[in-house]
Amino acid sequence: MVKGLSVHTNVGQLAALSHLGVTNRVLQDTQLRVTSGLKINNPQDDSSGFQISTRIRGDIVGITAVRTSLDLGVTTVNVAIEGGKSIKDLAIEMKGKVIQANQAGLDTNSRTALHNDFIALRDQINTIALSAEFNENNIIKSGATTLAVLSTQDGSTITVSAQIMDSTTLQINATNLTTSGSAAAARTAIETAIALAGDKLAALGASQKSLTIQSDFTSKTIDSLKEALGTLVDADLAEESAKLQALQIQQALGVQALNIANAGPQQLLGLFGIR
């Protein structure tokens, strides 16, 4: 007698289908982990882990935007510093013209030539001050205002004060070498301008350092968050690959078991001599 056969219910088939369905679902999840490289792909994988990973990803995006802002700020200040260094060099070159213009017994032609060179150098200072721009920001030109650089996700900023370095701010706009008297006055003015340019460069350097420190900090924060995210969601591919192979074998065996269960009704027909 064949045991467990029924005309109403194929118990073996139901059991085989149930086990095969479970295997297929687990296999599908494992395949997703292998292909994505993640052990948490959906909320149902780990609801709390999914929530935490979503928040970490959001923080990474936000802090990356902050770092971009800081890097743009650093570059803006760098451009200003390079412009300021060129301006200071021009002021030093102007000092050389002033010293020559203060020589006793200087003839008119020589004085005129020195004066023209002096004015050309002064005009070049203004040209550089106007052109030291990056990302539509210039903090050394006439009329420049402070630069607010985003430094945190909550909207805090690092303020970079403008360090205007045109000839008017350096107090040499009215200087000339046309006479011995004006040349003497220009000597004092140019010394003051050189010192003032140095002070402004020092201030820009301090601002650059603050921005660089904050940018480096945000980079380290991003690295730490990425490491934490990886620990939380990255799949162990060696483990998952081994699991995948085992599940594929289980799936094949499940299909075979289902085929055997499906043969049950044929056995029942055989009891009645039906082929």
Image: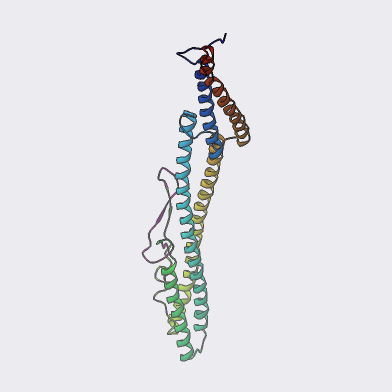
Image x and y of residue 202, in percent: 51, 60
Does the magenta run of residues contain 143?
yes
- Closer-to-camera residue (190/268): 268
Q: Is residue 210 above or below residue 114?
A: above
Image x and y of residue 67, in percent: 48, 50
Residue at the outermost top position: 1
Which quadrant does the N terminus fall into? top right
Q: Is residue 204 above or below residue 88?
A: above
Q: Quadrant of residue 182?
A: bottom left
Residue at 50% in and 56% down: 208
Image x and y of residue 34, in percent: 56, 37
- Closer-to-camera residue (271/84): 271
Decide if residue 142 is on the left or right side of residue 214.
left
Residue at the outermost left position: 143
The chosen color scheme is rainbow
Does the magenta run of residues contain 131?
no
- Closer-to-camera residue (215/264): 264
Residue at 53% in and 43% down: 221
Q: Is residue 194 above or below residue 44?
A: below
Image x and y of residue 246, in percent: 62, 29
Q: How many marks?
A: 0
Q: Which residues are magenta?
A: 138-156
- The majority secondary structure of the magenta stretch comes to loop
Q: Is residue 33 above or below residue 61?
A: above
